[in-house]
Image: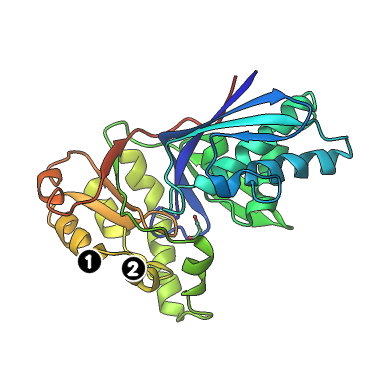
């Protein structure tokens, strides 16, 4: 039996809209077993058919691309990544589907090619890149392809996620973004993203706090997230950087200590402190 473990990812990392993402050690685990027909075990009812299951879609995409006859499998799922919360649950399904297909295709495609396939399916690279490569990954696009670069993260940095009990679909969260932005807002973000790798590498929280201030998406999306302002005001009082994780509703906190936890507990949302992930595992 094939087992694939895919980590949660926090896309954007505040100022890196559609560019930066980080892998975190919260997992979705998938099993694949050859079968006479497709079966979906452990998925929510709405994802229990070929028509609605994104793992299947991604799996089929790779067989179609390879022009090979699809191998029917029973797909088992145990998931810890919450759905539609800005922690890369969709990209975990895509990554599992394409890596499983590649296994049955006797590793026809390299990891790099699988990354190209994953970005073609997802449309943006900032979840699938860290889900595949692990760590903090920045991707850029050239001639329709994305190119990922991995940056070091200081070992003392801690990544906490606050997960509201509210789903936000990426589609809806992209829908609230303006069609155009003032030049000064772009420059604001550019000046921050260029300095971000230094802050992560040095574990420099003061710098991270300054740099975690986005003008491209966060001001428009914050209204979709209950208690966003309350949580942000709490975190701003401490030595910690705060941002929306992906398109929300989860919020990401980067810090060296967890001194904010007691006060954060007043807001009744689950908070997890996670390690940086190391990328997809195929066993
Ligand atoms: N960069 C994407 C967005 C990530 O913010 O819409 C979605 O998870």
Give the secondary structure at mark 1. helix
Residue bearing the label numbered 1: 229
Image location of residue 93, percent across then percent down: 59, 42
Which of the 4 image quarters holds residue 92? top right
Is 121 on the left-hand or right-hand side of 104?
left
Q: Residue at x 55, y 35 (%)?
A: 133
**Is residue 189 placed above or below 276 in the rendered structure?**
below
How many marks overall?
Answer: 2
Image location of residue 234, percent across then percent down: 15, 57
**Is residue 90 placed above or below 173 in the rendered structure?**
above
Front one among 181 and 221: 221
Q: Are marks 2 and 1 in contact (CB under 8 Å)?
A: yes
Which of the 4 image quarters holds residue 38? top right
Is 102 on the left-hand or right-hand side of 77?
right
In which quadrant is the C terminus drawn? top right
Q: Residue at x 38, y 70 (%)?
A: 215
Front one among 211 and 73: 73
Label 2 crowd (10 A; few <14 / some 14-19 / many >=20): some
| Residue 158 appears in the rendering | no
Measured Cα–Cα span from mark 2 to mark 1: 8 Å
Give the secondary structure at mark 2. helix
The label number, if any, that marks residue 4 in the structure image: none
In which quadrant is the N terminus drawn? top right
Is 203 on the left-hand or right-hand side of 153?
left
Residue sitting at the far front: 45
Label 1 crowd (10 A; few <14 / some 14-19 / many >=20): few
Image location of residue 185, percent across then percent down: 41, 75
Residue bearing the label numbered 2: 222
């Amino acid at each position: 039996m094939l087992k694939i473990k895919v980590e949660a990812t926090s896309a954007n990392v505040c100022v890196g809209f559609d560019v930066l993402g980080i892998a975190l050690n919260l997992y979705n685990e998938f099993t694949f077993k050859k079968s006479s027909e497709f079966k979906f075990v452990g998925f929510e009812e709405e994802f229990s058919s070929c028509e609605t299951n994104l793992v299947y879609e991604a799996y089929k995409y790779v067989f179609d691309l390879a022009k090979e006859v699809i191998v029917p499998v029973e797909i088992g799922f145990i998931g810890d990544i919450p759905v539609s919360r800005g922690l890369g649950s969709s990209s975990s399904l895509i990554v599992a589907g394409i890596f499983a297909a590649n296994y049955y295709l006797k590793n026809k495609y390299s990891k790099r090619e699988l990354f190209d396939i994953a970005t073609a399916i997802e449309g943006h690279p900032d979840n699938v890149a860290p889900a595949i490569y692990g760590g903090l990954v920045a991707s850029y696009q050239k001639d329709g392809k994305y190119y990922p670069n991995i940056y070091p993260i200081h070992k003392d940095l801690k990544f906490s996620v606050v997960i509201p009990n509210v789903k936000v679909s990426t589609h809806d969260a992209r829908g609230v973004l303006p069609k155009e932005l003032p030049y000064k807002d772009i420059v604001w973000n550019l000046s921050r993203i260029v300095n971000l790798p230094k802050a992560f590498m040095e574990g420099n929280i003061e710098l991270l706090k300054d740099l975690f201030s986005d003008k491209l998406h966060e001001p428009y999306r914050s209204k979709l997230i209950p208690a966003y302002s309350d949580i942000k005001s709490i975190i701003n009082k401490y030595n910690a950087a705060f941002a929306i994780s992906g398109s929300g509703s989860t919020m990401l906190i980067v810090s060296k200590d967890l001194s904010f936890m007691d006060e954060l507990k007043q807001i009744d949302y689950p908070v997890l402190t996670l390690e940086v992930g190391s990328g997809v595992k195929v066993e």
